Amino acid sequence: MNMPTRKNAQTFHVEAEEVRTPGSLIYTGEYRGIQTELEVYQFDSKSLRVEKYHRPEDLPQTSEEGVVTWINIIGLNDPKVISYFGQRFGLHEMHLEDIVQVNRHAKAILAEDYLMSEHYMIFGQKEIHHESVVLFLLKGFILSFQECPGNVFDGIRRRLQDASSRVRQKKEDYLYYLMIDALVDEAVGVLKNLVYQLDDMERLMLDESQIDMRRAYEIKRELLNVKSALYPLDGFVSVLTGEQNHVLGEEILPYVKDVEDHVAQAIREIGRAADTVENMNQSNMARLSNQMNSIMKVLTIFSAIFIPLNFLTGMYGMNFLHMPFLKHPYAFYGFLLASIAIVTILVSYFKRKNWF
């Protein structure tokens, strides 16, 4: 049996890549074993209806006037489900591709009849999780596509249960703002937790305690993830509040600009935290260098003390027949006293020079 050559293997790889044409719905994320689940919230100021489905064909096909419908799609493995929502709501095929082509950054696109925004959701305290979320804002509808269950929208779900809450009195654009705000707040919460850990490590370093710099580098990597989630939102908010905005109401724009302020503050905090990690690294390197210098200093002092002793020992270890004091009865004791005197003189000299 002939083994494939490297050239043939490379050709096969190129052909496999060509199968993925623009607009193809091939999920590229990590959560491939998640079964598709559909959550539907239909509400107005008077009523709330919550349903769960596994097939998009079972979803309500109509919505009453004044009722806001939020459809949360969990699991992006089934291209038929993604295609169904594209056909039903008139979503562009390239925007459908953005749902399954998982990216770790935020962006917003204003289409003719809807607003699409892609987000990098980061949440958790002890263990940090990352997930891609895509939102669509249409007239009377919110579509949210996420990779796995359990996310930062639980607070919004609790608000929907309260008939007197503001979200029940508002339209779909206010719900969209709450979802953006929840994503930002959760990322900021992760950022604050990382900053607290860095501050604790910095205090330990100031107390001359040993710290694990590997953990500091892990925190720095997570800071970059938080930055990836927040930094693009600066331009993202500009798209939402620009002159071409025809989806968000005027009363929602101040809320969105407030989110922009939170993002700007968080980005500045990320910069400060990154500087802290760099300063800790430099301080740790300086401390290790000082420790090494101290060790070398001690070794050098011991070497300087024993150099004259080695000289005397080597000289009287030569095999000459006639050497002074070689056969003297007290030669050994004299040599011992001379060695002690040399050590005492050198130690006193080094001590006077404050070399140790």
Image: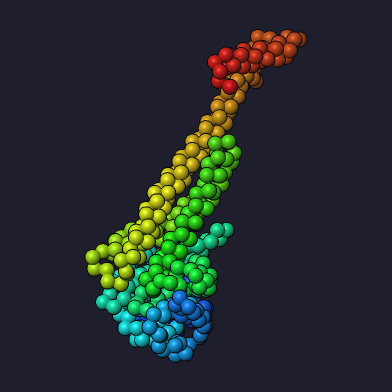
Spot occupied by residue 138 in the image (x, y as percentages of width and height):
34, 77
Seen at 57% across and 13% down, the residue is: 352
Seen at 39% across and 80% down, the residue is: 66
Picture quarter with the C terminus: top right
Spot occupied by residue 347 in the image (x, y as percentages of width and height):
61, 16
Q: Nearer the viewer, residue 125 or 289?
A: 125
Seen at 24% across and 68% down, the residue is: 244
Horizontally, residue 155 falls left or right of residue 144, namely: right
Spot occupied by residue 229 in the image (x, y as percentages of width and height):
41, 61
Q: Is residue 70 above or below residue 227?
A: below
Q: Nearer the viewer, residue 43 or 198?
A: 43
Spot occupied by residue 87 in the image (x, y as percentages of width and height):
34, 86
Q: Is residue 355 above or below residue 296?
A: above
Most extreme residue toward the right, as rendered?
Answer: 329
Q: Is residue 25 visible?
A: yes
Horizontally, residue 199 falls left or right of residue 178, namely: right
Horizontally, residue 215 falls left or right of residue 17, namely: right
Q: Is residue 327 visible?
A: no
Q: Nearer the viewer, residue 30 or 266?
A: 266
Chosen colour scheme:
rainbow
Picture quarter with the N terminus: bottom left
Q: Nearer the viewer, residue 294 or 202?
A: 202
Seen at 42% across and 50% down, the residue is: 270
What is the number of callouts on the image? 0
